[in-house]
Structure formats: C-alpha cells, structure tokens
Image: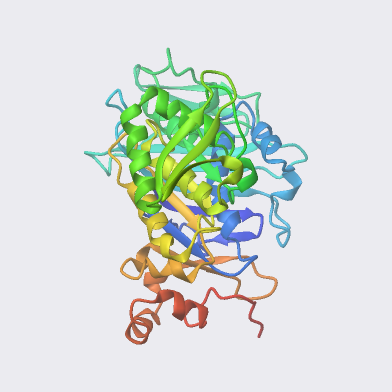
Amino acid sequence: MITGFAIKNFKNLAQIPPGEGELVPFGPLNVLIGPNGCGKSSLLQAIDFLRAFFRSSAEVYLQERGWNYRDLPNLRESNKLIRWELKANLEANKFGKGAGTYHYVVTLQPRKHLGIGEEHLTWAPANEPHASITLIERKGRTCTILDRFHDAATTREMFRLPASILSTLDAGPDRVRYPEALHFREWVEGFRSFLIWDPKILRAPSRGKHVEIGQSGENLATVIGQLKDRSPASFEKLVRRIRRLFPTISDISISGRGWGWRHINLHETNGKKAVFNSQQMSDGILRLLAVTTLLYLDEIPTVLTFEEPENGVHPQLLREVVQILRELTQRKPPNRCQVFLTTHSPYVLDEFYDHPEEVYCMDRPEPQAGGRVIRLSDKAQLAGVRQHFEKSLGEAWVSGLLGASAGMRTK
C-alpha cells in the first residue's frame, strides 16, 4: 500500500506536497474532491504512470495512453524534470519474501527524448523498520543494484534509458538474487487505472480469455464469463450481490463460450419473466455490475484508481458503490487492494462523514497556480462543519465551507 506520495512538475501539478521532502499520506481508501482543473485526474495519472518505468520502455505506456512526452511536464515551470517519490508498506509475496517498507524515487530528465535521470529504491524489513537497505542506485546510464544472494552490489550500464533497471530482471532466475526488487516491481505492475466507464464499451460483446476489465470497461462480458467458467461459487456470489442491489433481477447469464464472442444477459422477474441483453440494460446497472465484479475476481489489482465511479448511479445506491470499493481494500493478502477515486458527488462525500482522513481536498489557490492537496481531517473548519451539518459533509462542501469548490479564487 502506498503510504506516502509526492509528485513534482507533472501536468498541472507543480509540486505536491509543497514542502521539500514531504509526502502526502495515503490509506487504503482515498477520495479526491475539488473543482475541474485542480489536478485530481493528474494525481491519479501520476500514480498510475509509475507502471511505465517497468515496461520495456516508458514510451510504450505513452503510446497506449495516446500521450506525448512534451505534454507531461508542468507548463508553468521552466524546469521540465518530472520527479516521483513514494513510500509503500508491502506484505510478503507468495514466496514469503519482501515484507517491509519501500522508498522509491525516480525522475524523467529534461531532454528531447525520454530518459530516466535518477532512480533510487531502498527497503527496510518489516521486523527491522530502521535497517534500510539500498537496492538500486542510478544516475543516468550507470546503475548499481544489490544482489541479495551474494550480498554484493553490481554496476551496469543501461541502454534503455526510458525504463527502470528493474524492467531488465527475469522473474524466474533472478528471483533469488533480487527478491525485494522483483516484489516491488510486481506490485507496481499490478496498478490499474479506470477512466469514467463508457456504457457503450461496457455493453459491447467481447471474446478471448480476458481476466481483467479494461480501462474504459472493455471485456466485461468475457471477464464475467471467465468467472462463471472458472469459479462458479464466486459467480454465484456476484449474482446474489446484484440481486441485493436490484431485487427484480433473478439471474445473470453469459452467452457464448471459450474464445468466441460472449454477451451479458440479465434475467428479470417482476410479475413476468424477461431476459435483457446488454444493449437493453441501463447505464447504471452496467456500471454497478462492472464495479461489483471486481470483488469476486481471483486476482485484483494492487492499486486501483477510479474516475468518478458514481456516474450514472442512482443516489440511493451510491452507498453500495462506496461499500464495494471499501471491501476491495479489506480483502485478504495477496489480493488486498488500495483504492483512489475522484468524485464530484456530495452524496459520495456524505459516506465519509466518519472518515474525513480518507478525503483529500484539491484546489488551485491562484488562477495560474498548480494544484494543491489538503487532507480533510487536517482542515481547521472541519469541527465547525460537523456541528452545523449533521451527517452531511456533502452539503457543507457544496456550500463552499470545506474549500475545494468550483471556481478559482483571485486576490
């Protein structure tokens, strides 16, 4: 789990948090609120971008996103270097290795072509939190990596500049020599980002052996079909959960099988029996079906970022959406997940009345300033708001009493 994060010079995030050496503390479930343009999506993108360093090249990640490197640095800053820093507490992997605290720093250097300027990774064992060990030290092409089996550091020259040295390790033969480094890489590779799910994509048939829902909702039919084929008990749990949300639904069926095209069908009993295909389902039901499916997959992402999961969902069901996301963070290792989400819904915010430490207010203090983030539990006005707005943080937010409101303030 990410316990602290800092980003500098990424998109409209000039420096978060503003103090050198500081990190924004995060927990299992984290909600970002604030006006359009304050940097909520940029912060989620900055977290997910860490995956790029463990591909064969960060340029592969950029191509998948449809981004260009020149669009990444903050346009208000003359210095085009981008810097990430995070701390994470990880549990042991399936081999019983790697439990402890990791501290990772990486920069993209300001050149015409992508290149990692610096990369540092340290690890402290869970039972010795102050015994920090340097696993990676890199400056430009020159990388030093610690061989834990031989207890010796080796130096290499990197020729793939837009990639971490960890991307060159083989998860098989290198497992004994670099157990913690590989554990960290595999944890970051498990990050997944969901945009605002597109109902047109969610309802589309899909084929293949996909076991993950795509960024915009791709492959939902295949994923549910694979769940039914491989884990009937988990599929039945999914059906029961959907029935709880929509009592008139009696069953879910998936037409097609194997590598062929698969389609989702909902069976409804409300006086008369009826079967609706995905083209006939509402947007809200499709989105709730997608987010609920995540709960019952054999393997879920290590970190999930969501853009406005409340879209298209009735306000009375938003509590269920929040509960599902919370349950994702409460699964047993190794499938425990950390969740980040953005929202513009006061109803979603109301669900965090008793957990203000899970809410982060993002704002732009000046028209030309970069975004900033403040934990709601650290806001001085929180106590007064809770006195006057019983059980409704959302109403206080809409009233402008918590900050992070629409519009920008000027002097």
Q: Residue furthest right?
A: 112
Drawn side of residue 284 relative to residue 389, left or right: right
| 94 lies above or below 325 | above
Q: Is residue 390 visible?
A: yes
Quadrant in the picture for the C terminus: bottom right
- All told, the count of numbered labels is 0
Q: Is residue 302 visible?
A: no
**Residue at (50, 62) in percent of width and height:** 17
Pinpoint residue 132: horizontal percent, then vertical percent.
Answer: 33, 39
Q: Nearer the viewer, residue 231 or 306?
A: 231
Q: Nearer the viewer, residue 282 or 126?
A: 282
Q: Residue furthest left?
A: 127
Q: Splitting the image into 4 quarters, where does residue 177 fall?
A: top left
**Residue at (59, 70) in percent of width and height:** 35
Q: Nearer the viewer, residue 377 or 261?
A: 261
Q: Residue furthest front?
A: 272
**Residue at (34, 17) in percent of width and height:** 149
**Residue at (70, 51) in percent of width and height:** 80
Quadrant in the picture for the N terminus: top left
Q: How is the image coloured?
A: rainbow
Drawn side of residue 342 relative to residue 37, left or right: left
Pinpoint residue 240: horizontal percent, then vertical percent.
Answer: 33, 43
Q: Residue furthest top?
A: 173
Pinpoint residue 381: horizontal percent, then vertical percent.
Answer: 40, 82
Pinpoint residue 294: horizontal percent, then vertical percent.
Answer: 42, 40
| 53 lies above or below 306 | above
